[in-house]
């Protein structure tokens, strides 16, 4: 596709269940980011993949959160044993090079609601 | 580590009036600065960016921002707003040198009224 694609667009789950959120970046973009957007909290950095380098996981809030990027393209963000405070919009972005010299292109996000 | 502060969570303004959205950053080293806009029910898109050179940068939709190193600010301005400018605006910073994550502020909701 022409832009960053995220799925599902909406996910409602019960507390304690695991969820997977998928991101398909723009073809050829080597950098991929996950952010979390909560009401009044702005955009919280979660994890950053750049090419074959080890990912920057410094923003992951707990060990229940993990992400992988297969084949340098599609990424999956996994949240295990979801909690109500995990409810947020999870945004994925990609760029051609590192963010400092290029523009980030964002998907429309996956809205997660944990009941 | 770098950080961004957007002091105004909401800014109401009448159509055709000027507007300034404030952004201050904190970093001990050189940075690149960005403004992103999120229209209702849409993803974020780049409004403008400062990498180097002229401190006054112009972006899409008539917006501009000025990098002020001494005041560590990167305020966003528009001389005359339109209803369609109603959106959330995010300031962001990253370290120069490549391969660094983008740190966002908490956002400013601009509401343009008739």
Image (cartoon, coloured by chain):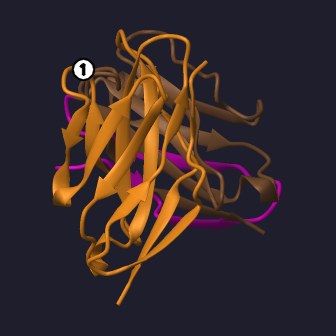
Indicate yes or no whether the magenta region holds residue A81: no
Colour representing chain B: orange
Give percent across and percent down for residue A14.
77, 65
Judging from the image, mark 1 belongs to the subunit labelled B
Dividing the picture into quarters, in which one does residue A113 lie?
bottom right
Residue picked out by circle 1: B52
> Which picture quadrant has residue B1?
top right
Q: Is residue A12 magenta?
A: yes
| Local SS, label 1 | loop
Q: Is residue A96 above or below residue B91?
A: above
Residue drawn where x is 65% and y is 52% of the image:
A41
Q: How far across and how far down the image is residue B15, in percent?
A: 31, 81
Q: Foreground residue, A43 or B96?
A: B96
Segment tinted magenta in the rendering = A1-28
Left or right: residue A27 versus residue B99 is left
Name chain A's colour: brown
């Amino acid at each position: 596709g022409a832009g960053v694609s995220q799925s599902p667009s909406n996910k409602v789950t019960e507390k304690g269940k695991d969820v997977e959120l998928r991101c398909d970046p723009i073809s050829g973009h080597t950098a991929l980011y996950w952010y979390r957007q909560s009401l009044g909290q702005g955009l919280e950095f979660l994890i950053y993949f750049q090419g074959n380098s080890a990912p920057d996981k410094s923003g992951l809030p707990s060990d229940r959160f993990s992400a992988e990027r297969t084949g340098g393209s599609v990424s999956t963000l996994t949240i295990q044993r979801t909690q109500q405070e995990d409810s947020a919009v999870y945004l994925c972005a990609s760029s051609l090079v590192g963010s400092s010299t290029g523009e980030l292109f964002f998907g429309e996000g996956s809205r997660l609601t944990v009941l | 580590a770098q950080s961004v502060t957007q002091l105004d969570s909401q800014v109401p303004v009448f159509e055709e009036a000027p507007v300034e959205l404030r952004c201050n950053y904190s970093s001990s080293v050189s940075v690149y600065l960005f403004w992103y806009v999120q229209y209702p029910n849409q993803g974020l898109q780049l409004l403008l960016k400062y990498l180097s050179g002229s401190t006054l940068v112009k972006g899409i939709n008539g917006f501009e921002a000025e990098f002020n190193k001494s005041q560590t600010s990167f305020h966003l301005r528009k001389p005359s707003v339109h209803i369609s400018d109603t959106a959330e605006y995010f300031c962001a910073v990253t370290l120069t040198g490549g391969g660094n994550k983008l740190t966002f502020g908490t956002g400013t909701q601009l509401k343009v009224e008739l």
